[in-house]
């Protein structure tokens, strides 16, 4: 999941691909430092 976000997918898109519920993923990943780092890297790549 984190790898997909790092590649530039949104969390919602990554959830659809993996079959994990969006709210469940959001609940667990919102405090995960690796996920937050992946989001920042994805933002830098897009810009």
Image (cartoon, rainbow, N blue to C red):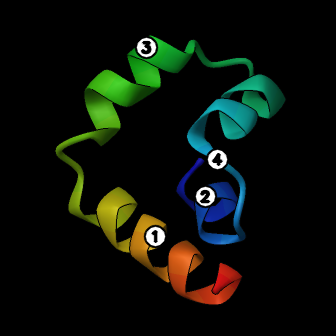
Q: For this view, does 23 lie left or right of residue 22?
A: left
Picture layout, residue 38 above or below residue 29: below
Q: Residues within 10 Å of mark 3 (few under 14, many from 20)?
A: few
Of callouts 3 and 2, which one flags the residue occurring earlier in the amino acid sequence?
2
Q: How far apart are marks 4 and 1 (CA)?
A: 11 Å
What residue would you read off at disc 4?
A: 10
Please state the horizontal and vertical placement of residue 47, each as a whole percent of the image: 63, 86
**Which mark is first along the chain, 1 or 4?**
4
From the image, state whether disc 2 or disc 4 is nearer to you: 4
Query: Residue 12 at what x, y percent from top left?
Result: 64, 31
Asked which secondary structure carries label 1, the reply is: helix
Residue 34 position by quadrant = bottom left
Disc number for residue 23: 3
Mark 2 touching mark 4, by CB under 8 A?
Answer: yes
The residue identified by callout 2 is 5
Q: In this view, does 16 lie to the left or right of 34?
A: right
Instruction: Place residue 18 in its image quadrant.
Output: top right
Please give the name of the residue rendered at 71% of the width and 70% of the height, measured from the top-left corner.
7
Residue sitting at the far front:
47
Task: Give the labeled residue for mark 1.
Answer: 38
Secondary structure beneath dot 3 equals helix
């Amino acid at each position: 999941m984190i790898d997909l976000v790092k590649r530039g997918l949104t969390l919602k898109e990554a959830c659809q691909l993996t079959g994990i519920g969006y709210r469940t993923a959001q609940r667990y990943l919102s405090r995960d430092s690796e996920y937050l780092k992946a989001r920042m890297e994805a933002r830098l790549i897009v810009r």
